[in-house]
Structures are given as structure tokens and as C-alpha cells.
Amino acid sequence: MPGLEARRVTKRFGEREVLRDLSLNVQPGHVYGLLGSNGAGKTTAINIITGLLAQDDGTVTLDDTPVDTAARCVLGMVPQEVAVYHHLTCRENLRFFGSLYRIRRHELDSRVGEVITLCQLDDYADTAVSALSGGWQHRLNLAVGIVHRPKVLLLDEPTTGQDIEARHTLWRVIASLRDQGTAIMLTTHMMEEAESVCHTVGILHRGCIEREGTLDQLYATIPAAELAEIETDDEPALERRVEELGLGLRHYGGKLTILLPSRTTLSDVVARLGRVPIKSLALRPVGLQHVFFDVMQTRA
Amino acid sequence: MLADSVVVARRILGELKRNRRLLTFWIVFPTLMLLLFGWVYADGYGGLGPSFTATAPGILIGAAMFFSCLSGPVALIVGERERRTLRRLLVSPISGKAYFLGVVWAHLAIAAGQAALVYGITYGAGGRFQGSLTLGVLIVMLSAVAYVGLGFAFGARLARRTEDVTGLVAAVGVPLLVLGGTFFTTDMLPPFLYTVAQLDPIFHMNQAFRGAAHGDFVLGAMARSLVFLAVFAPVALVLGARSYSRMLERERSH
């Protein structure tokens, strides 16, 4: 199948297994989000997919071709750090990196113009990178990764450290590339990002994808229609009451969270908790962060 | 591969054009050294013209090209690592060989520019290039190739950060440059140092180019230096290429 496919990829550094039987599939026109805490194996996965690192077992194909020099022509990579030449202008950087993909000169000029417009770099196209602020440099970093119109695009934590406007610009560009049929995989720490742009999300924990699916499929793995985040001075009393009510209680990101089987109101929750002292209470819909914390808690 | 290497060379030269500080340094340094030593030795050589004729080869090969073609690739490799552009290049279709070749082309072009500058000033002061131009060009090219090879070897093995470059060049390079007779003829060296200097590649670059520039290449010592250089330049290039290749392997596994 075209796009990106990894099958049972395993990687060891000495005795330590950093990826175990990693399998994922990103079809053209789809966005796959790889979530994981630090050290989960995201960077190793990216390095293997780009061919920087050889796997010990398993296969990776890009557009139906094993990763080699030829396959790299269809691969675009946007690293987390701005990796461009600071003495050159934006246009010169784009021309240089585009030339490495053997694009003919007249076509290259038109593609450079397209990505400059797409990433809203028009006003700074002929400005040296060293004179640009961090946000504009990140836009160029993205533009460099897509100037050769890759069929498979990898983004490594693309919005880390960026302001809200830059983040939305990037999400808009990702949506545009997705609509053009690019297979996109991104790693991120930001749940909001994954929920905004990803069709499918895989949660990586200690080298394994522990949970994977569409957002709705992932939300459905939490046995609740709604969540009540609660702060109390008497946690044992809360635990007893929740058990009496036959409800689930979890620690999601350090917050005590009651799993509610149906949608309800704050007053109803307060009434059901009876004499448990409540410092604060909020109702939340199930989100990706809860799924993420659930995986971490289950596997801890 | 050739087309890719030309793209890399154009990028390096484009960056140099925009990096005014470095460009200015590479113009000012050989200019001042040539003017200074041409003036210092004027009485000894019987006038400015002969003094510039005698001084220009050492200033071009031993001073100007030393800093551009040796420390240039070291700084380039360190810069690619620090800016993370090296990893971006590694995931692109360009081969390591094409990149390496591109750096060689760029530094040959820089060496040609510095040769034009040094001999432009020399001619302005009444000095001349009196020997075989073809041989002179060949020696400049061999020297540039040798420097780039050494630059890759040092840069890939020893320099991890920008701060390392200055220390490395000062500690290893400058003594070799002085011992190689860049600023004076090696006749001034005591016998022991003259023997040690035979092991210094810069000594042979200077000797060979002086012979070619002065038209007295027929002398045995000059011919020996050319043979040394003809052997040393490809060896340095292979050494640099291997060091670079090992560095890429290390970079891939990080």
C-alpha cells in the first residue's frame, strides 16, 4: 500500500529494547499522530523511518519502496529544531534543498513560490534567515520540508515552542497537504495538536504502541461518557463514596477523576458525593489526554 | 553526483558571499600579511617588486589558503552539525560523496579567488609570477585539496563545537604554518628544524609553489616537494573522506 508502512520494527541499543514490534500505516491523505512521553521511542521511530538508523528487525516502506536513496525522494522531514542556513535568504534555502531532490530549475522556481505563499513567507522571502524571528524561521523550516512535494511527510514535534498563530498556520498547512494526498506522520506532546489534525493516533509507551485508533475509537477506550475532575482534602472518603456508587476513579495527570457512565450536571455530582468535602469540581468530556494518561497508568 | 556537488558548492559560496565578516577576514588577512612582509623584506630583496615576488607564494599557500581551505571545512562541518542541517542532508537523496566533492569545489573556487587577490596586489607592487602558470595552478589545486582533506579529518574527528575550531587551528595549524616557511624562506631554519620541517606538508606546498612561481622548479628540492604534494594531497583527501564517512555513521546513530 502506498504511503508509509512500518511492520514489526524492533530496535535495540545494546541490551535495551527501545522499539518492540512497532507497526503503523499512514495512507495517502491521512495524518497519523505518534504520541508518547520522553524516552518512549518516538525519535528512534522517526530515525528508522527516515533511514538515519537501521532497525534490527522488521520493514519500513515509503510509497511501497524500502527506505533507500530513491525512497528518500518521496520523503519530507520537518525536524523539531530549525535546520536551515542562516546566512542565506528563505528563497535561497528553499532553492538549495529543492535542488537536492533533482527538481528542474523552472519547476523548482514555481514550487519555491508555492511554498512561500502556503507558509505565508511572502514578505520575508528574500530576507536572510538570521534576520527573522523564531516563528518565521519555523515556517521556513516547514517550507523546506515540503518544497519537493513529498508523498510522505514526517514532522517531529513541529509546534514545540511556537506561538498560537504559528501553530494554527502549521495546522492549516498540514490540512492542505493532507487534502492533496500526502501521507503525514507527526510526533507530538500536544494533545490539542493531535486532536486538531490527526485521523489516527498511536500512543507509544516504552517502545510499543499500546493504543491506536481514530479519535473516537480512542475516546471509547475510557469507560465513561463524561469525566468529573475533583479536588478534595479527604481522598479516602472520596474513594469510599465512589466505590459505593459503583463508579470508576482514576488519577489523570495528577487530578482525581471520576468516570461517569452518562452525561450529567455539577449539582447532580455534588448530590451523589454526599458528605465528601469538595474544593473544586469540573465536568469534562473525554479527551485524548485522558486516553494518554490511562495508557500510562495502566502500564505503570 | 556531479550536479549535486555543484549545488553544494554554490550554496557554500552563496553563504560566504552573505557572510561579510568571514569574507572580509579572508580578504584582509592575506592582503595585510602580503603588504607587511613585502615591506619588511623590501631592503633584503633590493626593492618592493622583488620582495613581493618572493613573499607572495608563502602568503598565498601557507597563510591565505591555510585559513580558508583548512579551517573552512572544519568550521563548515561543525556548523552543519550545530545547525542540524547535516541531519536534513542525511535524509535527502544527496550522497555523502557528492557533499564532500561539493566542499572541495567550493574551496578550489575560494583558493582561485585568493590567488587572484594575492597576485593582483603583487603585480600592483611591481612583483611578478615568473614561472609556469600551469604548474602554479596545479600546485594551488593540490594544496587546496590537501587542506580540505585535512580539514575534514580534523573537523570530523576532533571538533564538536564552534569553539573547538579556533583552538584546533591555533594549536595544530599555526605551528605547522610557521615551520613550513610561510613567512620566511626555510634557509633561515636551523638544521634540526629544517629536517623536522620535511615532515610538514605546508613546507612542501610552499617549496613547490615557490619553485613554480620563481621559475626555478628544476632544482631537486622543489621537485621532491612536488612529488610529496602529489602523493600527500590524495592521501589527505582519502583520510578526510573516511573521517567524514565515520562521522556520518556516528551522526546517524544519535
Image (spheres, coloured by chain):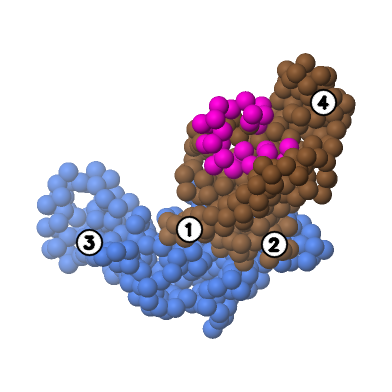
> Is the Cβ of the residue at disc 2 closer than 8 Å to that at disc 1?
no
Which of discs 4 and 1 lies nearer the camera? The answer is: 4
Q: Are marks 4 and 1 on the same chain?
A: yes
Label 2 resides on the chain identified as B
> Label 3 sits on what residue type?
Ala
Write the start and end of the magenta stretch as one range: B182-210
**Dot 2 amino acid type:** Asp
The numbered disc on residue A300 is 3
- Compared with A256, A74 (above or below) is below
Query: Residue drawn 76% across and 29% down?
Result: B54
Secondary structure, magenta segment, majority class: helix
Q: Quadrant of residue A41?
A: bottom left
Instruction: Tell me the residue that label 1 is attached to.
Output: B246
Q: Nearer the viewer, mark 4 or mark 3?
A: 4
Image location of residue A252, percent across then percent down? 28, 56
Q: Spatial distance from mark 4 to mark 1, Cα to Cα?
A: 47 Å
Judging from the image, what secondary structure is the residue with disc 4 in? helix
What residue did someone put label 2 on? B4
Nearer to us: label 2 or label 3: 2
Mark 2 secondary-structure assignment: helix
A294 left or right, relative to A64? left
Amino acid tagged 4: Pro
